[in-house]
Image (cartoon, rainbow, N blue to C red):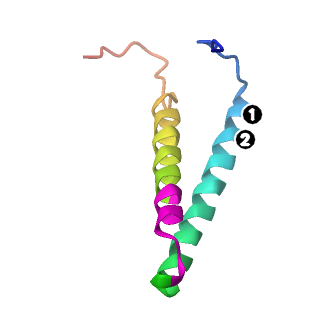
Amino acid sequence: MPKYRTQFEIGLDELRLIEESLTSRVGELSQASLDFQSEDLRLKDCDTVTEKMKELKEIRELLGRLHEQKIWFEPEAFVPRG
């Protein structure tokens, strides 16, 4: 079984590209969900819908973790925390 690296060096532009790609995929999956709701439910495979919803959830969780790792504001002066 292969081993995986535990640390990665990804530039800010690369990270932005990853986030934009994931966000685009979320849009595609959401549109597919809307299309499913507008069509006859008997014509669709429920397993396919379940897989798409699972993928959607995984991507949203990953985007959330990426979002939480960003530093949105760093004060120049000392600010006590905690």
- Residue at 24 percent across and 16 percent down: it is 82
**Three-letter residue code for mark 1:** Asp
Mark 1 — residue? 13
Q: Nearer the viewer, mark 1 or mark 2?
A: 2
Give the residue drawn at x 47%, y 34%.
65
> Do tag 1 and tag 2 residues touch (Cβ < 8 Å)?
yes
Asked if residue 78 lies left or right of residue 43, the reply is: left
Residue drawn at point x = 46 percent, y = 60 percent: 50
Nearer to us in this view, 34 or 41? 41
Task: Check if residue 25 falls in the magenta segment.
Answer: no
Pinpoint residue 67: horizontal percent, then vertical percent. 50, 37
Q: Position of residue 31 (x, y in %)?
A: 58, 71
- Residue 21, numbered label: none
- Identify the secondary structure beneath mark 2: helix
Range shown magenta: 43-52
Q: Is residue 5 above or below residue 14?
A: above
Magenta stretch prevailing secondary structure: helix
Which residue is under mark 2? 17
